[in-house]
Amino acid sequence: MGIAKIRTAVAAAVVAVACTPAAADAAAPLGLTACGANEGVHQCTGLVRTWDGVPLDTTVTLPSANAVDAGPIPLVVEIHGFGNSKHEYLDPASKAYTDNAYGWARAGYAVLTYTARGLWGSCGTPDSRLANPDACARGYIHLADHRYEVRDTQELIGRLVDDRVADPARIGVTGDSYGGGQSFALAALRDRVMMPDGSLVPWRSPAGTPLKIAAAAPVIPWTDLLGAIAPNGRTVTYAVTPPGATAEPVGVFKISFAHGILAAAQFATGPGQPVGEPFVPGRPMGFLAPPGADPDADVAGWVARADQGEPYDDAEARRVVDTLERFHSAYNIDASTAPPPLFVASGFTDDLFPVDEALRFVNRMRRDHPKVPHALMLGDFGHQRASQKAAERERLVGRIHAWFDEHLRGGARAPRGVEASTQTCPRDAPALGPFRAASFARLARGEVRFAAADPQTIDSTAGDPAIGTAIDPVGGGGDACATTASADQSGTATYRLAAAPGGGYTLLGAPAVIARLDVEGDPARQQIAARLWDVAPDGGPQTLVARGLYRPTGDGDQVFELHANGWRFAPGHVPKLELLGADPPYGRRSTPEFTLRVERLELRLPVREAPDGRVVLKPAPPVLPAGQSAVPGVTPARRRVRLKLRCTRSGWRATATVPGARVRRIDFYVNGRAAAADRKAPFTRTLRMRRGRAHVRITARASLAGERAVRGTRRVRRCSSRR
């Protein structure tokens, strides 16, 4: 027998001894009979059939065999990441993102960990399906569907309450990635269950006990699955995203991530095997719905449709969009119910679920439910390209413990507000911070601004593929500190700021771009791929600081952000903004080819340093995207009508624009009298003058979508036809 097989056999023997049936008075929740002592706590494991009969590989960990003799205790539910299993939290040598089950049990909690349906021992492996062929027939992956995976968690919690293991008033949920998205959904539902038809009903245990989540701690989560995997740039950190904004239009498909996730849904690309077993790359461990079997779970079909590209306006594409928005996105769950106390951790360098996924939900919650306690932790951890700094991960576990200790056990007050640490290179260099503020917007005390008047053109076919590969989170190895050559690329719009002065400055937030775009053709089939680089002195190599994908709204003034980060621009280093027509292999190229003209660009970099009146300025009021409202505590720039006049033989040729707004109609007035109206961009009309006054007053009144009307006035000399 080989060394690996000997180790496996020994591990299996240890597990078997640990889980032999204990004394008759030992706790055996969920009907599990394989119970026993393990790592100084009490553990029960086995298969539990969920609400629709699918068997789920489940483990319940308790502080001791008699831990619930005096009554139910607080419950922590840990939901694993995609492609993983319950064993993410059953390895005593790893704290993962949210601590292991043993750490929570030693702290006095009951702990529920189970493998999501369609993965590993929950109908994922061929062996598990062979053992339960009928029950597993529909046990395939639903991709964190609120009606299936999320309901599975609620079902198991309810049974633990009925077993008098879990206190119904002290239920906490946490998890990372796949588990983070589900934790957010559970927080959004709170005391409700989503049924197969999408309706919401009160959450009760099988025996009828009313239930609700008392605290939640999603880690590296998504809140809008479509917005995460195909961003359109409509979410900004200082505004409340309107309902449906992430789907109109469908954004740019993160193709390398999507294909990686599809592979991880079927074959082992990372750990998930039982503790003590060797990892076997490529091992079958996931169960996808057979083609055509279930449109609500056709994960492979969804990816195939996205691969076909724009336009996403056909019936099949709209059905996929509707499914993802209604059943896979916490942000789109009816928000009339206040979430529980909420702690969220997101990674600055996470290219899959960036910081704005968390802020989207938190911003609206602050507006609609301002009394809900909440805290955010941001740093260099999460999905690729994150560096996974050990100190940050350790602090994260401590923060989650403190949050649950306060809200589930009445412990000391946990920190509130936002704390953020920076990305640093090399990857093992200590992070700067943590920096703290009452809200995300207040992390930055100053702003570095840059403006460019000269127009530049973006060619969708331009860009060096080698650079795109180097910074791709999947194909490039996921290295946040990768460097490339820094020469400007033809066919891109490139802007270099002045070198950082002595002392440098620290980006701490989301870089904002405000520009006028000239778009030819359908804007929903075009894109801007934005990259912010740190260029070393003397034209040295460059390191990616931030990136973002944006679908233009059409011609005119627009605003969008790159994903937030924390990064120190050292003295002599040059911030460089690069706008491309695509960012492959990270983002899918649009079809067909196109060109975009960029004019009057302004770049705003939020920095931690206080204004010095020279390089670091007082932050300017942010420009709101069309139809959006500011987050509480943020005062946005006032909408202004930009009125351009040109004298012609027929009179004044008036053109009106409102930067950042969605204009429905422009009404023009001359000396207070209605003169013309226009309902279509570019909102231009020729205004004929009456004889009389030497000067005239021309006013443009703009009716805006979702906002109050604004107006602008100019006083000019009469336009003579002889000019």
Image: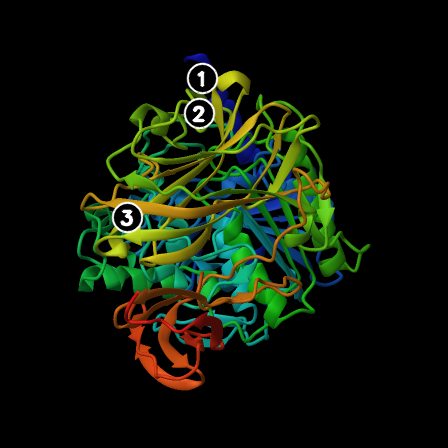
Q: Which mark is residue 278?
A: 2
Q: Residue at x 36, y 43 (%)?
A: 455
Q: Which residue is mark 3?
A: 288
Q: Callout 3: 10 Å neighbours few (<14), some, many (20+)?
A: many
* Disc nearer the start of the sequence (1/2): 1
- Confirm or deny contact between disc 1 and disc 3 (CB under 8 A): no
Q: CA distance from mark 1 to mark 3?
A: 31 Å
Report helix, strand or loop for mark 1: helix
Q: Please name which of the two marks, 3 or 2, marks the residue nearer to the observer.
A: 3
Q: Which mark is residue 4?
A: 1
- Tally of marks: 3
Residue 723 location (% of width, % of height): 30, 65
Which amino acid does the dot numbered 3 rest on? Answer: Leu
Q: In the rendered view, would you say 265 is above or below 558?
A: above
Report helix, strand or loop for mark 2: loop
* Disc nearer the start of the sequence (1/3): 1
Q: CA distance from mark 3 to mark 2?
A: 24 Å
Q: Callout 1: 10 Å neighbours few (<14), some, many (20+)?
A: few
- Confirm or deny contact between disc 1 and disc 2 (CB under 8 A): yes
Q: Residue at x 60, y 28 (%)?
A: 424
Q: Is residue 573 left or right of residue 706?
A: right
